[in-house]
Image (spheres, rainbow, N blue to C red):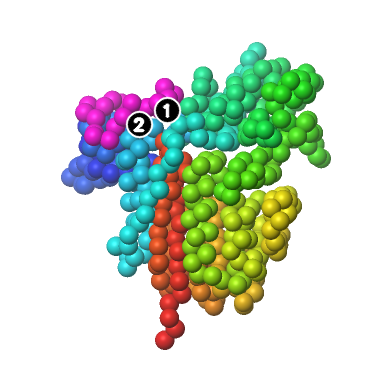
Amino acid sequence: MRLDVTIASLAPGGDGVAHVDIDGERRAVFLPQAAPGDVLRAEVDVSTRPARGRLLGVIAPGPERVTPACAWSTRCGGCDWMHLSLRAQEQTHVEHVRAALPGGWQGASISSHPAPVALGYRTRTRVHVRRAGSRVVVGMHGARTHDPVEVDVCVVLDPAVERGRRRLAGLFEGSPGRGEVEVALGAGRVPVLDVRWRGDLASQCFARLEEAVSAGDLAGARVTTEGSSRPATIGDPTPWTTGADGAPLRGTPGGFSQANERCNALLARHVAELVRARRPEQAVELFAGSGNFSVLLAREVPGLTLVESSREACETLRINLRMRGLRGRVVEADAGEYGWSAAAKLVVLDPPRTGARAVAERLAASHVRHVVYVSCDPQTLRRDLAILANAYELRSVATFEMFPQTSHAEAVVALDRRARR
């Protein structure tokens, strides 16, 4: 049915939420591309709970609606909040994190850290490449689909990454099949590619990649094709960013790294300050990756153990520590199963979006005195904090606008163990 609705709030997934009477029942309606206070005309499917709608038009904009900086924002799924003011994005992220806290903690003060820049900040992106007829299509995920949406320019990408993205159609011309390509910054802040391809790659594609590396347009590329036992490497595909300590931080091709260098520095320094204040002799960092936090924590903790499940990330982490003359015990293990020493008094964890339920359960039953939990998802944070609240008291909460123009943010929660009775 078609309805005119007023948006009351924004859900953690990014949709606007309105409340309407349908057949005598008060129902919630979720709408994408909505802002608080908007009066919208929508086509609503009332067969689902909550009801979900499609925006047909804006009758009256709310006070926080702005003109998107990107003409593709309603079709591309990358920036679901580009129609919101930065103030509204920041305030709503704080509200979502507050709602994720256990009931007794929801009155706590939450510090909020805005992004230093809101456009041109992303130092890596993943795009979809496929042949459609006689041409190659390069696109981001469409909103609520897996179909690629072609855009002429991506305004949130670092200019060097954007230049690399715009080269892709020409590089893969004539190649049947499809693939995913990650574009990141390499040595000298020149783009690098990590390619995972299904189907055949034209032989000219490898020649073009070599020419691009020779010309200095790419620092390198790693190409994994369907059925291959090992990737092909052209040039140096190693991604590099500026670490939170100001020194170059090595990454792994195709591996995870924070995509916002400047806001990440604020986040990592905040985590290091929390650790410094607790002065642990022994500490454990779980989900350590390539060392984003580790290169700061190793300066604060004499006995630091770093746990990461990826062998390649572990090797890179050791290199990052060695480049700085730092020490830390790097352990290749699953964070959910790793048994830390009884001497460990503090645990830092930065899990993926799925959270760390098994770790939370083990921490609640442990003798670990301090926990610093970094989260990118309020819903899994809510679940894990509900477990930890049985054993810990809340000390601080902070949000970081790591992903401007989107419904995602980072949160840091510091906990201290309750006094035993």
> Going 51% across and 74% down the picture, which residue do you hit?
369
Mark 1: secondary structure: loop
- Look at the image and tell me in which quarter the C terminus lies: bottom left
Return the x and y of residue 87 as percentages of the image width and height. Answer: 32, 40
Q: Is residue 69 magenta?
A: yes
Question: What residue is pinned by disc 2?
Answer: 83
> Which SS class for mark 2?
loop
The span shown in magenta is 50-75
Query: Badge 2 local density, few (<14 within 10 Å), some, or many (20+)?
Result: many
Mark 1 vs 2: CB contact within 8 A: yes
Would residue 148 be visible to someone looking at this image?
A: no
- Which of disc 2 and disc 1 is earlier in sequence? 1
Which residue is the site of mark 1?
Answer: 73
For badge 2, the amino acid type reads His
Amino acid carrying label 1: it is Ser
Q: Residues within 10 Å of mark 1 (few under 14, many from 20)?
A: many
Which of 140/412 is in front? 412
Outermost residue to the left: 24
